[in-house]
Image (cartoon, helix red, strand yellow):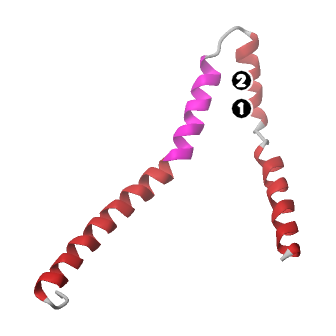
Amino acid sequence: MKRKALFLVIFLLGAVQASMAQCAMCRGSVESSISDGGVSVAANLNLGILYLFFTPYVVLGTLAFFWYRASKRNARKIQSTGHIAG
């Protein structure tokens, strides 16, 4: 158990360090934009990152909702008729 916990801690520390990485072109673009006094590029870059982050969760949430609704509907049919509709 201790070995698994140690592995998990080391793995998470490595993931945190890797998540701090940023591509050189994005970083250079944001730094030059901020040094010129503009913050719109940095704000738009952050908005794009958030968009890319939340899109898969929205898609999976939508699919899960439709699956849940269909399974509830099927369960009601089975309960009311007493057999599985094919």
Snapshot quadrant of residue 30: top right
The image position of residue 48, as x and y in percent, is 56, 35
Q: Residue at x 44, y 59 (%)?
A: 60
Q: Is residue 42 above or below residue 71?
A: above
Q: Which residue is mark 2?
A: 30
Three-letter amino acid code of the residue under disc 1: Cys
Q: Is residue 2 above or below residue 39?
A: below
Q: Residue at x 83, y 77 (%)?
A: 1
Identify which residue, 31 or 69, lies in the foreground.
69
* Quarter of the rendering occupied by the C terminus: bottom left
What residue occupies the far left of the structure in this picture? Answer: 81
78 displayed left or right of 39: left
Q: Secondary structure at mark 2?
A: helix
Q: Secondary structure at mark 1?
A: helix
Q: Residue at x 42, y 54 (%)?
A: 59
Q: Residues within 10 Å of mark 2 (few under 14, many from 20)?
A: many
Q: Main secondary structure of the magenta part?
A: helix
What residue occupies the far bottom of the structure in this picture? Answer: 83
Snapshot quadrant of residue 42: top right
Q: Is residue 29 above or below residue 83?
A: above
Marks 2 and 1: in contact by CB < 8 Å? Answer: yes
Q: Which residue is mark 1?
A: 26
Q: Residues within 10 Å of mark 1 (few under 14, many from 20)?
A: few
Snapshot quadrant of residue 85: bottom left
Three-letter amino acid code of the residue under disc 2: Val
Which span is picked out in magenta? Answer: 40-54
The image position of residue 14, as x and y in percent, is 84, 55
- The answer to if 49 sits in the magenta stretch is yes
What residue occupies the far top of the structure in this picture? Answer: 37
**Disc 1 and disc 2: Cα gap in Å?**
6 Å
- The answer to if 32 sits in the magenta stretch is no
